[in-house]
Image (tube, grey):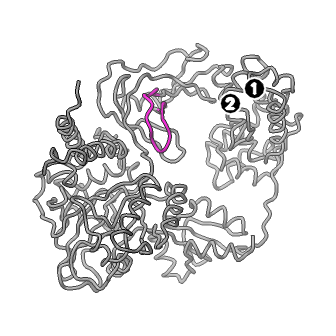
């Protein structure tokens, strides 16, 4: 059939409008941002190629959704435009080159901020008093959501030293990740819909007819744009300074530079730390700083030319469930896994995603054949978070026999997990060996899934202790192994014997003992023998180790099979001691530090460990005995108490500067 551009444009317009309605008006998107952007780009490219078929009502000529009718309409004094998106350094370079050509110079200053995944909101103040709050809507007309926005605690009702003339501030209303978990748990208990992400939760919370419902949701706000009014600033960076003076929270991530390469470098570096922030970030926003140059650059029909979104690869995607299989882990727990039509997500191709447990399958209503939304954050295993279209027919039934060994499957009445109770189950043995050799445990490079499968098939190993009995001849008999590869693996096995006690405790698979707990145990007892002989009371006395963990460690160290395995590892020459940490400067010796707010270069746990490395102690509460409070973004009551007590307050950078000055 011949290609008909007019029909294809009309088809794409209907499709984009359909997804716009789901996203903006129903708060229920079924496409990831990247998938939507690709669909939108197809339409835009066709309209540019065949402009005779482009119409004024095309979604490429307007912003997002429309006012829903639930709230009164508000006409924006200045249109609330959406940003063009870019996903690569080449896209950003093209944007910069276009701006430089229009300005006649390439040395213009830019401001880079984190792109918070929330809901755009316009706030209008008269004589410093908040009089109207409006959603973006279609960019020209939004919805009056003033009663709901008045419940957002960090939106000031009265501005400090603000001009008396009307002033419009724009920003993002958002929900923190931890608050989404709490909210979804409440929704689950009430039998209500579960929110797929923080953006949907913020939208659903704002668009409530009853403002008291919104008041129960811990929404927050960052100011990020100037709408209209007279202000004493000639640049965006100057405007942000005024926002702080007026009492607004502003984004904690910011770079000011005239170097495009510095922007690109910042984008790459920030990708490694953005998941440590308390809120979801899907990219950066790059803006020309000067208001005068912004006016020179102007706008397209729907987007400013002086700003662009520099987005990261999608972390959500929509795909089809081909099958649901059962995976048996090292503890015997049986996990349902969705086999998917391969789909790009967060920079990789995803073909499998966890469904966690069978209660989760029931809650989601997932069937084989359904279209689902998957999510991947950082290096986290992909998971199914929502059914986008329920078109499957095959229900998922929990197994009565282990899919690996055919043994009995057991389920505690009060628990959600199904377990294979056969300790000789091949799948459990395989998983325990792979865990033992993994990077966070004994870090045996070259001992991956394919090699372990061959070793098990040939019966060269039956558990992780057999790794240390492997010979050169064993390895040469494996597929694709020659002298060098065999010797490299033997060298890696030999090197693993010198790992710390903490690594070993994590590797042997004690229930409830992760890498951090293993480190605590190793630092406390120093040798495996001391830990093996520790009483239950001694284990319970460690502040960070709970009752369940203490009992698990105590029982493991007295289990005859576990003790036999540990003895075999001893005979193989593995290290059973924890080295004393070398501290070059005890700058925090005898001092207690409290960390509060959100840190940007490290997690709070990492910061606390760093303080301890330099002789300090950490606490979760502030008192007169506290030496320093290290305050990150959005520091709250702890910072206030420190100021009241006269406790020294450090920024994150000042804390790092102290460490750097110590010369470690």
Query: Which residues are drawn in magenta?
Result: 338-354
Classify 10 Å Cα crowding around label 2: few (below 14), some (14-19), many (20 and above): many
Give the SS element for disc 1: loop
Compared across the picture, whether 130 is left or right of 308 comes to left
Classify residue 407 by image quadrant: top right
Query: Is residue 7 depicted above or below 440 in this figure?
Result: above
Q: Which mark is residue 93?
A: none
Say which residue appears at 68% left-offset and 25% top-offset. Answer: 429
Say which residue appears at 49% left-offset and 36% top-offset. Answer: 349
Residue sticking out furthest to the top:
406
Query: Is residue 63 depicted above or below 622 in this figure?
Result: above
Pointer 2 residue: 432
Give the SS element for disc 2: helix
Pointer 1 residue: 463
Question: Which is more toward the observer, 208 or 126?
Answer: 126
Q: Estimate the x, y position of residue 162 in percent, counting from the top left.
A: 26, 84
**Quadrant including the C terminus:** bottom right
């Amino acid at each position: 059939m011949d290609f008909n551009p007019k029909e294809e444009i009309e088809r794409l317009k209907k499709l984009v409008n359909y997804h716009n309605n789901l996203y903006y008006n129903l708060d229920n998107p079924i496409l990831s941002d990247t998938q939507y952007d690709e669909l939108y780009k197809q339409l835009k490219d066709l309209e540019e190629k065949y402009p005779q078929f482009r119409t004024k009502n095309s979604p490429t000529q307007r912003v997002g959704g429309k006012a829903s009718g639930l709230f009164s309409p508000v006409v924006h004094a200045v249109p609330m435009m959406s940003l063009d998106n870019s996903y690569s350094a080449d896209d950003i370079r093209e944007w910069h080159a276009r701006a430089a050509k229009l300005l006649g110079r390439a040395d213009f200053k830019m401001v880079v901020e984190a792109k918070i995944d929330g809901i755009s909101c316009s706030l209008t103040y008269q004589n410093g008093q908040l009089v109207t709050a409006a959603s973006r809507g279609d960019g020209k007309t939004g919805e009056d959501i003033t009663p709901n926005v008045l419940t957002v605690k960090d939106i000031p009702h009265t501005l400090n030293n603000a001009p008396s003339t009307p002033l419009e501030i724009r920003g993002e209303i958002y929900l923190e990740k931890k608050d989404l978990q709490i909210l979804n748990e409440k929704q689950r208990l009430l039998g209500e819909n579960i929110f797929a992400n923080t953006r949907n939760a913020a939208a659903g919370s704002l668009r409530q007819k009853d403002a008291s419902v919104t008041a129960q949701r811990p929404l927050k706000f960052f100011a990020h744009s100037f709408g209209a009014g007279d202000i004493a600033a000639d640049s965006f960076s100057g405007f942000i300074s005024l926002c702080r003076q007026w009492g607004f929270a502003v984004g904690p991530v910011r770079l000011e530079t005239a170097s495009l390469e510095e922007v690109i470098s910042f984008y790459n570096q920030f990708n490694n730390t953005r998941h440590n922030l308390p809120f979801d970030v899907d990219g950066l926003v790059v803006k020309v700083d000067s208001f005068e140059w912004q006016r020179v650059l102007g706008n397209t029909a729907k987007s400013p030319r002086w700003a662009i979104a520099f987005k990261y690869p999608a972390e959500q995607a929509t795909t089809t469930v081909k099958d649901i299989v059962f995976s048996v882990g090292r503890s015997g727990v049986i996990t349902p896994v969705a086999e998917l039509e391969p789909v790009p997500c967060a920079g990789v191709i995803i073909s499998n995603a966890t469904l966690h447990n069978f209660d989760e399958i029931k809650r989601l209503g997932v069937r084989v054949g359904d279209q689902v939304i998957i999510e991947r954050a950082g290096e986290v295993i992909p998971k199914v978070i929502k059914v986008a279209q329920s078109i499957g027919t095959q229900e998922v039934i929990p197994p009565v026999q282990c899919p690996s060994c055919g043994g009995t499957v057991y389920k505690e009445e009060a628990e959600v997990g199904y377990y294979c109770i056969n300790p000789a189950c091949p799948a459990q043995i395989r998983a325990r060996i792979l865990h033992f050799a993994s990077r966070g445990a004994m870090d045996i490079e070259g001992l991956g899934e394919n090699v372990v499968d061959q070793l098990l098939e040939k019966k060269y190993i039956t558990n992780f202790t057999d790794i240390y009995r492997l010979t050169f001849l064993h390895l040469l008999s494996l597929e694709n192994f020659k002298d060098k590869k065999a010797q490299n693996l033997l060298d890696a096995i030999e090197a693993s014997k010198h790992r710390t006690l903490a690594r070993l405790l994590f590797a042997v698979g004690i229930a409830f003992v992760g890498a951090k707990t293993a480190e605590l145990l190793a630092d406390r007892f120093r040798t495996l023998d001391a830990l093996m002989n520790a009483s239950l009371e001694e284990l319970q006395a460690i502040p960070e180790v709970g009752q369940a963990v203490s009992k698990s460690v105590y029982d493991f160290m007295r289990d005859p099979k576990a003790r036999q395995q540990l003895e075999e590892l001893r005979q193989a020459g593995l290290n059973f001691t924890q080295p004393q940490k070398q501290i070059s400067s005890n700058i925090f010796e005898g001092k207690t530090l409290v960390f509060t707010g959100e840190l940007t270069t490290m997690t709070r746990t990492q910061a606390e460990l760093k303080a301890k490395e330099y002789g300090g102690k950490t606490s979760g509460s502030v008192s007169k005995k506290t030496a320093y409070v290290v305050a990150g973004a959005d520091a709250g009551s702890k910072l206030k108490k420190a100021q009241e007590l006269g406790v020294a307050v450090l920024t994150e950078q000042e804390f790092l500067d102290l460490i750097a000055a110590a010369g470690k």
